Image (cartoon, coloured by chain):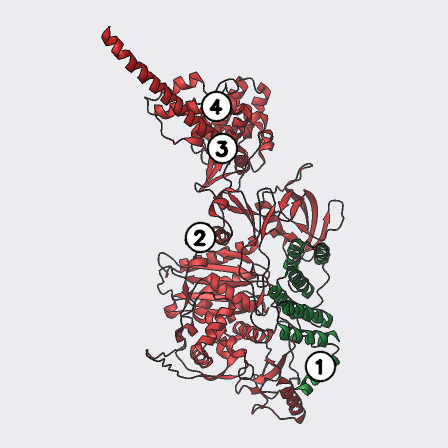
Chain colours: A red, B green
Amino acid sequence: MARRRRFWPYLRAGLLTLALLAAGYTLYLDFRVRHEFEGRRFALPARIYAAPLELHVGLKVPEDDVVRELRELGYRPTARADGSGWYLRNGAELEIALRPFVFWDGPQPARRLRVAFEAGAVTALSDAQGGELALARLEPLPIGGIYPTNNEDRLLVRLSDVPKTLVKELIAVEDRNFYSHWGFDPRGIARAVLSLGSGHVQGGSTLTQQLVKNFFLSPERTIRRKLTELVMAVLLELHYSKQEILETYLNEIYLGQDRDRAIHGVGLAAQFYFDKPVGKLSLAESALLVGLVRGPAYYDPYRHPRRALKRRNLVLRETRDEGFISAAQYQAARATGLGLNPRPSTGTTPYPAFVDLVHRQLRHDYDEADLRSEGLRIFTTLDPRAQAAAEHALADRLAAFDRQGRFGKPGLEGAVVMADPQSGEVQALVGGRDPRYQGFNRALDAERQIGSLFKPAIYLTALEDPSRYTLATLLDDSKFVWQPPNSEPWRPENYDKQYHGQVPLYLALAHSYNVAAARLGTTLGLERVIATARKLGIGRELPSYPSTLLGAANLSPFEITQMYQTIASGGFRSPLHAIRDVTTMDGRPLKRYPLAVAQVFPPDPMYLLTAALQDVVREGTAQSLSNWLPPLGAAGKTGTTNEQRDAWFAGFSGGRVAVVWVGYDDNRPARLLGATAALPVWGEMMAALVPEPVAFPQPEDIEQVTIDPQSGLRADAACPGALALPFVKGSAPQERAPCAGNPVVDNVKGFFQRLLGQ
Amino acid sequence: MRLLFLLATLLAGCATAPPQAPSPLPPAPVAGAAPAVPAVPAAPSAPSAPAANPAVERLMASARADQAASRLGSAEATIERALRIAPHDARLWQQLARIRLQQGQYAQAESLAARSNTWAGGDNALRAENWKLIAQARDARGDDAGARAAQRNAERYGR
């Protein structure tokens, strides 16, 4: 008795403590459930879009290219009386039912378009009633996103947008008593506990429990965790309505994997598997999604279509057995095929190199966490046609080298950057031979010797002073030794190991003579030339060695593109950029990235430099470009580095400036020239894009004068090989070449020019 | 010095049609009997007076309306959209320069007006307008000498 009495208070205290602990733990769980469920918003990735295609009369675009873009946007080639998202081809006319889209400058409603084509250009543009349209914008191609750390992707949907049948199927298969239970289903628990010993837990959890598990808990399977899950499920049911729980569940659930991208929620799953909004899913289609809940990998309809079909039909049968659908509905749905979206999977993005650039530029203005969770919409400058041309040209050329069998393994690599010279908008970016591979981005991060690509900086420095240098000025290409104080003498050599004597400036650049360029650069002064390169857009510090003149510095293809953008625009530097606009998820504008232009060189020397770079293509090291392009006055420069480790071509046509690099990642000699490895990629890519001729109106202060290239003096008809070159007025040589006559009239004219030029 | 300036303005004044310079500039080898002035291949696309493109005209008008209503961000976006269609239209560059001036971005305004000048071809009125814009931009930045020089250019072309 006494013993009992002594024991009882302890037991009571123990039980009380236990009860208090349990209550405390429940309170803690309650806090977590309320706090996290309410505070929790789904992390939505930033969505990235390419530049939209703007149709207008006169636009040079083949009909096939427009159709390809529509197909990539998921438009179907069949008319549907209602709805949008389709196109029809009637000979040279295209009828398009545009989907509505919220652009950065406001929403654009769904509309019908008629577009007529002739000879690769748009000749008429009208609406469905035949009313002429000035301009029509296709929706931009989605090209990827910036995802939460686990690459979760989803499209949020409201419960009211989800078909009732989908909800019924889900309840029939996953949780029949959903609307009546309090968060758990005793039969389900019993089943789960019993199967614990067998090593794998079979479902049996309610939808609420599944949600709790995905939301709050780690995936381990213990009794304690199961109990916590149960308590939290009950708490969730206490605080929230069935509708709220169901809506969250439908957005949370994991339904598939697209390479590195995890497909969450029925909204994105509907788009991924069927390319439609969730509201448009048929009975059979929604049954497939519901079937995936149990094992998106095991029932993956692309990999295991039979298994997926069987599972889908099971979902349909159970839905019928529950009385949610009729026998006739069941039979009809069962008879349909899977009807999957045939679009090949792209993972997080088909353009990892470009998206990488977008991401880096966004980081200047946004928190990483916001980019990965706020659902921002990023409108970029990517031109899908330019991108495709660049990818194909590089892959084709590298494949051709592979077939030659002399380049070993790992094979040659390459990179391409293309931009609009007028605005600095990046149109295409390829980071390696496999453009889908998300790895080393050579376009941005490969830092390689640039070789002769640097030479325009030397010649531009000279041409800025027309009283001393013109395109006809004879440069000395004889043996040259530079003795800097306190260091080894520098003896530059030409590629052909020859010296070429007196060479007019434009020819020295056209043939890329190293000795003449090195002598000119040291005469002008290393610092002046480096200052020119900086103004052209080379941001990083270049070493103050004479070898910098011949391109010993390591730069990325992207940095070189900036330099050539300034040249291609006639001296107006525009920072290369990949983003135009950023809006919130619902379309509110957040930030514009406006066109920025800085005039860093006057037009005259830029005009002369452009003429010289056109000579490189016309008669210099890039002559072979004529194998790909008609004479458009394209301008550019080849580059080949020591022991042929790097092959470069940088150049521009009317609307595009582009840089191509080819070499080995480990920097071993590639035994390739800029002209044989990089130039063909450039030529093939530009040829695919219907290039425009180079347009650089002749400035007022420029005149054309006929020159004898041998002597660099004025020529006339008697001189063989005479050549018209542009000169800043008054800077052309007055003296006549030995081959030319000496008429008085011209002398008088020359006198006036000298007078005005001073 | 003064004489030279006079001479220059005189000559500029005489030139009713200033050198309508052809664009791409491949220096052509002169074969046989060369004329006193070397033959330069005709321009495939004339830089000035671009063919009226209804899309560009519509966007320009819309941008002008935005400007009048002080919706400068929208005006800027619209002009950039037009420039993607017609990058060689000097009027568009000038309108963008004017927007930047209104926004107080004087360095941008000056560069954009200079950009417009490179595509202006024989349109002297447009050039004069560009130089006025440059003068205003320089004036706003406190560059008095530069502003005066730009103003002189404006007068030269405005004649």
Please report whichever mark, 3 or 4, sits nearer to the chain's N-terminal start: 4
| Quadrant the C terminus of chain A occupies | bottom right
Disc 2 is attached to a residue of which chain? A
Disc 4 is attached to a residue of which chain? A
Label number found at residue B9: 1
Q: CA distance from mark 3 to mark 1?
A: 75 Å
- Asked if A204 appears above or below A66 in the picture, the reply is above
Q: Which residue is mark 2?
A: A434
Q: CA distance from mark 2 to mark 3?
A: 33 Å
- Callout 2: 10 Å neighbours few (<14), some, many (20+)? some
Judged by depth in the image, the label closer to the viewer, 2 or 1, is 1
Q: CA distance from mark 4 to mark 1?
A: 89 Å
Q: Can you tell which quarter of the image residue A713 is in?
A: bottom right
Q: Can you tell which quarter of the image residue B86 is in?
A: bottom right
**Both on one chain, marks 2 and 4?**
yes
**Both on one chain, marks 3 and 4?**
yes
Q: Nearer the viewer, residue B155 or A382?
A: B155
Q: Nearer the viewer, residue A338 or A290?
A: A290
- Asked if A709 appears above or below B20 in the picture, the reply is below
Judged by depth in the image, the label closer to the viewer, 4 or 1, is 1
Disc 3 is attached to a residue of which chain? A
Q: CA distance from mark 3 to mark 4?
A: 15 Å
Disc 1 is attached to a residue of which chain? B
**Both on one chain, marks 4 and 1?**
no
**Both on one chain, marks 3 and 1?**
no
Q: Which residue is mark 4?
A: A174
Q: Amino acid at mark 4?
A: Glu
Q: CA distance from mark 2 to mark 4?
A: 42 Å
Label number found at residue A252: 3
